Amino acid sequence: MLYLDPWNKVMVMAGAAAAVAITILMVVCFVGEGCLVYEVITNSKKKKDQARRLSGALYGAADKNGANLTNYAACGRRDVRHIPTRQQSVASAHSLNEKVERSLLSRLSSRSRTDSTYSSMSSGRTSPSSSCPPEDIHSRDKLPSSPPAVAFSLLASISPDSSVAKLAIAVESATDLPARDYGAHCDPWVSVTVLRDRRSIRRRPPAPIAFFRTKTIRHAHNPFYSQTFITDIPRKEMKDISLLLTVMDQDRHCGAVEMGHTTITLKDAKQTVEDPVKFSTAQFIKQTKKECGDILFGLSYLPTAQRLSFSLIKMTNIKIQNIKEGETINPYLRIMMFSQSGRLIKKKKTTVKVGTKDPVFNETLNFEVAPGQLEVSRFLVTLCNRRQVVDTMIMEDGMEGTNQDSSD
């Protein structure tokens, strides 16, 4: 047993306290910033890392593992397969086809200095959304608005040894697209249809050969697409080939709505000659509105109850497209209320009238609207068709039916 006098006990306690204080101080110096030891250690680590970077290979060099540069020049097809030697003729034809498409794309993507129309339509837009800056929007509001237009380019590749020609269609951009009727921004996309005229006495409509569509760009009145499509066309019928470019608005409430269209023939684009050159243009689109029928309704407002009432009486001469033979029309009306900015506030619909083109509703739909919102609120009345699909299944109860809605 070790006995300590009071002074020895004090000295032991002081030594323990000093050891604890030194340990805390060293931990703080190694972890926290501002200490001399911490600065010395971090500076030495930075020098070692910098020396290691300078001694290694540069990014993208051949002697550095894990760095592979992408070959953007190879813009042909990616579905390359190893063909046996007995099919060398097929392989050579496939490679020739790739070379033709590659040269066609390179010729189409090269911009000509003399093409002022194409350069004016495509300059100044670098992002797919192609949204104008706020200052440009305010400045353009003051200027008179121009009609909506679509810019595109065409180039045909004609081989003397082949009966099929290749046509490259580049959809560049669209400009000055209008907003929706209820104030919201549009979500445009462009459809390209290759048509072949039918030479007959009955004047039948042109037959579609190929169909393409661009991506949808949300909330853009001047969208920039820069998408190219390639199709094969008969060389003997190039004079009868025409293009139909339609600008569509992908409306979530009404479906795809046509904003306008334009047409051009390969003969007008000077692509039927032996050695055609790239044709670039910007054409105005024709805005057409389709008639779906006549509606009879009444509108009244009660200020004390702040209630706006739509009295829907009937509809006549309903015209709905994409109706198959033997399919019945089951119409109903949907009314949507929008704010000044185009935001949906409320929607209501009538009952479905089965199997009629002249439905009689005699219904009233009420909306709560404050007196101060009458001038800024907007209402959209849409005609919808409910398609009934009956699935026959072997069950104990018999048949099971489902309903599908589609708006026109």
Image (cartoon, rainbow, N blue to C red):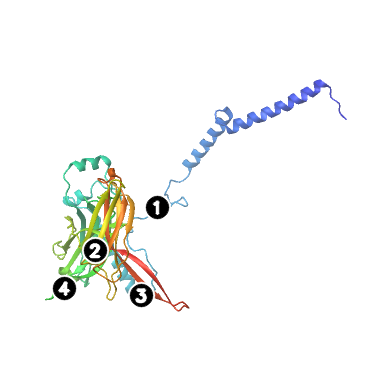
Mark 1, mark 2: which one is toward the viewer? Answer: 2
Residue 363 x %, y % = 29, 60
Q: Closer to the N terminus: mark 1 or mark 4? A: 1
Query: Which residue corresponds to mark 1?
Result: 69
Residue 388 vs 150, above or below: the answer is below
Q: Closer to the N terminus: mark 2 or mark 4? A: 4
Distance between the Cα atoms at labels 1 and 2? 66 Å
Q: Closer to the N terminus: mark 2 or mark 3? A: 3
Q: Closer to the N terminus: mark 1 or mark 3? A: 1
Residue 297 x %, y % = 23, 58
Residue 225 vs 192, above or below: the answer is above
User: Are the residues flagged by discs 1 and 4 in contact, CB closer than 8 Å?
Assistant: no
Query: Which residue corresponds to mark 4?
Result: 204
The secondary structure type at the circle numbered 4 is loop
The secondary structure type at the circle numbered 2 is strand
Q: Residue at x 26, y 60 (%)?
A: 312
Residue 227 vs 316, above or below: the answer is above
Q: Closer to the N terminus: mark 1 or mark 2? A: 1
Q: Residue furthest top?
A: 7
Query: Which residue corresponds to mark 2?
Result: 314
Q: Residue furthest right?
A: 1
Residue 295 x %, y % = 22, 61
Q: Residue at x 63, y 32 (%)?
A: 27
Mark 1, mark 3: which one is toward the viewer? Answer: 1
Q: Is residue 182 left or right of residue 6?
A: left
Quadrant where the image shows the C terminus: bottom left
Residue 213: in sight, yes or no? Answer: no
The secondary structure type at the circle numbered 3 is helix
Q: Residue furthest front?
A: 304
User: Are the residues flagged by discs 1 and 2 in contact, CB closer than 8 Å?
Assistant: no
**Alpha-carbon neighbours of circle 3 within 10 Å: few (<14), some, or many (≥20)?**
few
Q: Which mark is residue 87?
A: 3
